[in-house]
Amino acid sequence: QVQLVESGGGLVQAGGSLRLSCAASGRTLSMYSMGWFRQAPGKEREFVGTISWSGGSRYYADSVKGRFTISRDNAKNTVYLQMNALKPEDTAVYYCAASDQTTPYLPTRVALYDYWGQGTQVTVSS
């Protein structure tokens, strides 16, 4: 089992930055692809970005490309989401997730992730 805990959320003004962290326990993250998702009230959980187990490959949703950066430190069992140039539409609960599914591509679907954190609230004011 993998337990994931997100932190680093908060209230920030538009144009500001936040860095989210996802700390893992139970099993090392090294063999999992990791993803970040977000969910606003009344909306579907949407893909934000993903990173391969090695950290060598990344993929982002178009809505955050160029502004958000995923990184991972397997030695620390931690994944990060650096969010820059935040917009009010980025407001959501952000979730960290781990996937051990066998796919020929980096997973971007909710169903392909096996473990989820509790989420951390990010609120961007205008």
Image (cartoon, rainbow, N blue to C red):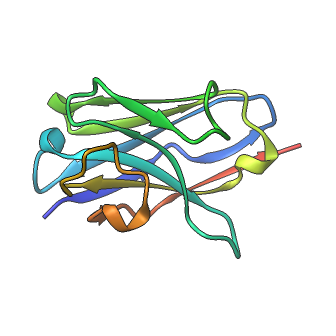
As rendered, which of 59 and 78 lies closer to the eye? 59
Q: Residue furthest right?
A: 126
Measuring from the top left, give residue 36's x and y in whole percent: 45, 48
Q: Quadrant of residue 31?
A: top left
Quarter of the picture holding the N terminus: bottom left
Q: Which residue is drawn at 15% across and 29% down?
A: 75
Quarter of the picture holding the C terminus: top right
Q: Which residue is drawn at 33% across and 28% down?
A: 57
Q: Residue at x 11, y 57 (%)?
A: 26
Measuring from the top left, give residue 66's x and y in whole percent: 62, 24
Q: Which residue is drawn at 50% across and 54% down?
A: 37
Measuring from the top left, give residue 119's x and y in whole percent: 47, 60
52 in relation to 100, above or below: above
As rendered, which of 56 and 96 lies closer to the eye? 56
Q: How many discs mark residues in the rendered view?
A: 0
125 in relation to 99, above or below: above
* In-image side of 37 versus 39 (left or right): left
